[in-house]
Amino acid sequence: MSETICLIRGDGIGPEVTSSAVRVVAAAGVDVEWVELPAGASALNEHGQALPERTVAAIMGHKVCLKGPLATPIGGGFVSVNVQLRRRLGLYAAVRPVRNLPGVPSRFDDVELVVIRENTEGLYSGLEHEVVPGVVESLKVATLSACTRIARWAFEYTESRGRKKVTVFHKANIMKMSDGLFIRCASKIHEAFYPDIEYEELIIDNGCMHLVADPGRFDVLLMENLYGDLVSDLCAGLVGGLGVVPAGNIVDDCAVFEPVHGSAPNIAGKGVANPLACIMSAAMMLNHMGQTAAAERIKTAYNAVLTDGDPALRTPDIGGRGTTDSFTQAMVAALG
Ligand code: ATP
């Protein structure tokens, strides 16, 4: 039976990396009917809207989406489509597994952590205004309900994956109310429902120092929206960069999978974007859909291509001299 999956190709390198992932999913033997949907800067040009209503409706209907990165104008312009999508679809939990890959050069070889990011609140609430000329405010929002549901989600995830420890990054020494609420909720959920999971709270600046000194000490990291954004990229740097970190935004009735990286306009159209983060996101998606054998085949294939170590196959960001296409072809051959 064929699977129906929504596809947003995205901006910048988005079309290149999503095309690669689509080829790899087909080579893994999954019969997919892709429902292509407009979103982002390209949708604004072609449809007059950065997030057309039919895109939201289709993802709500089909419940699963693979999404390329969407460009967000800096310092003005339309509201980030990534943020709008997460809000409209209620995708409050982002999960980003960060681990070493065979043959990918990195400073550490024992990274096996997961960043869980609250996706809907904090400074991403979009509540900004000018108080008087020359003075602006951005409001950081934290609610009991959202802090509690992300804490529950994080502990549930930790338990279901057999992981052992949750570390919450926060700055409750300064933001006593908002970050204070976040850690109180996490601590309550831990005490009430998951006392057997190890629990730790770290002030985020100290946490970042520990991350770059000894990432192997961490297991699951839980944090609010902006911290999750920053720490995800930091963690990507621990294992070889943005080209190798996937993500899923997952709630009960809807899930959107996407690479952690952005649209990388500096390399768009050059054919050198690393498609692996998008391929790994597709593998996460297949696991989520119960297509675990196909997901495992994809994982085995990229491990084999990377272990082979041929620099002509892999992209420059991970030490190769290949292209998006050479890596994709190697994946297809490994799957074939
Ligand atoms: P956006 O504004 O959409 O977030 P950005 O360029 O600010 O885009 P990213 O797209 O996250 O931020 O990328 C930062 C840099 O990392 C890029 O300029 C690019 O050099 C590199 N990079 C990101 N993703 C990849 C990838 N898949 N393959 C190779 N290099 C990448």
Image (cartoon, rainbow, N blue to C red):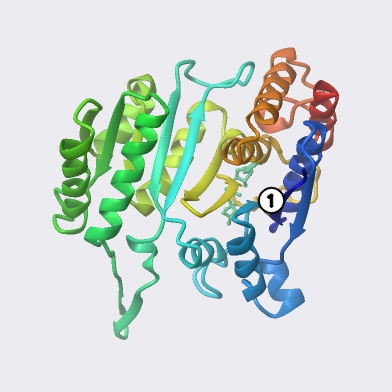
- The percent position of residue 209, horizontal first and vertical second, equals 31, 31
Residue 129: name its quadrant.
bottom left
- Tell which of 123 and 52 is nearer to you: 52
Q: Quadrant of the N terminus?
A: top right
The kind of secondary structure element at disc 1 is loop
Mark 1 surroundings within 10 Å by alpha-carbon count, few (fewer than 14), some (14 through 19), many (20 or more): few
Can the viewer see residue 322 in this picture? no
Question: Which quadrant of the rendered structure holds the C terminus?
Answer: top right
Q: Residue furthest top?
A: 308
Residue at image position (77%, 45%) is 2
* Residue 122, image x, y percentages: 32, 60
The total number of labels drawn is: 1
The yes-or-no answer for disc 1 within 8 Å of ligand 1 is yes
Residue where numbered disc 1 is placed: 266
Picture coordinates of residue 28, whole percent (x, y) = 77, 31
Specify whether 291 is left or right of 173: right
Amino acid type of the residue that numbered disc 1 sits on in the rendered structure: Asn
